[in-house]
Amino acid sequence: MPAVDDPSEKLFDKAGADTLLPRLRTLIRSLQEVAASGPAFEGRERLAHAGRSNGSPDAAASVFRAAAEIQAVLEKIAGTGAILRDLATGLCDFPAVREGRPVYLCWRLGEDEVGWWHPRDTGVAGREPL
């Protein structure tokens, strides 16, 4: 069995994943702030109301700005090789190989370091300490 399905996939060891944590903390908190500010999530309602009231360029522009900000941050996170699994908790996986098997190293916002791993097919429910 090959170690990974995708040879272009970036693989991490604990040290490499830990090195990314300061950047990921900043990016995830930024994303959480944009999401909490409302425009992206309130956007559908605002656009629906704008449509009923013959349009509102300001409402649409606000929604599109928030969506663009979210997309830009998601692309930065993806560019690190980490996989953001849950925005609310800041849960991230890092593709890795452990004992010849493809796994994920696992970290959650608020944890000091990457200290967990799980098989790729179990998700966070299968998290075990490194």
Image (spheres, rainbow, N blue to C red):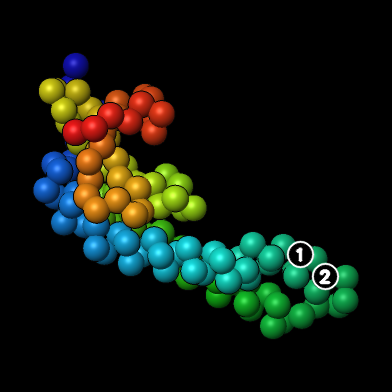
**Among the 4 quarters of the image, the one containing residue 57:** bottom right
Residue labelled with disc 2 = 49
Image location (x, y in percent) of residue 59: 70, 77
| Residue in the picture at 39% in, 33% down | 124
Image location (x, y in percent) of residue 121: 37, 24
**Among the 4 quarters of the image, the one containing residue 130:** top left
Q: Amino acid at mark 1?
A: Glu
| Residue in the picture at 69% in, 83% down | 58
Image location (x, y in percent) of residue 17: 19, 49
Give the answer, above or below, for where 13 lies relative to 99.
Answer: below
Image location (x, y in percent) of residue 3: 17, 26
Q: Which mark is residue 53?
A: none
The answer to whether residue 127 is left or right of residue 34 is: left
SS state under label 2 = helix
| Residue in the picture at 30% in, 59% down | 24
Q: Which mark is residue 45?
A: 1
Task: List the single residue furthest toward the top.
Answer: 1
Q: Amino acid at mark 2?
A: His
**Among the 4 quarters of the image, the one containing residue 46:** bottom right
Task: List the single residue furthest toward the bottom.
Answer: 58
Residue 81 is at least partly visible in this image: yes
SS state under label 1 = helix
The answer to whether residue 38 is left or right of residue 120 is: right
Give the answer, above or below, for where 54 lies relative to 100.
Answer: below
Whole-number angstrom distance, CA of label 2 to CA of label 1? 6 Å
Residue 3 is at least partly visible in this image: no
Pointers 2 and 1 in contact (CB under 8 A)? Answer: yes
Give the answer, above or below, for where 24 lies relative to 108.
Answer: below
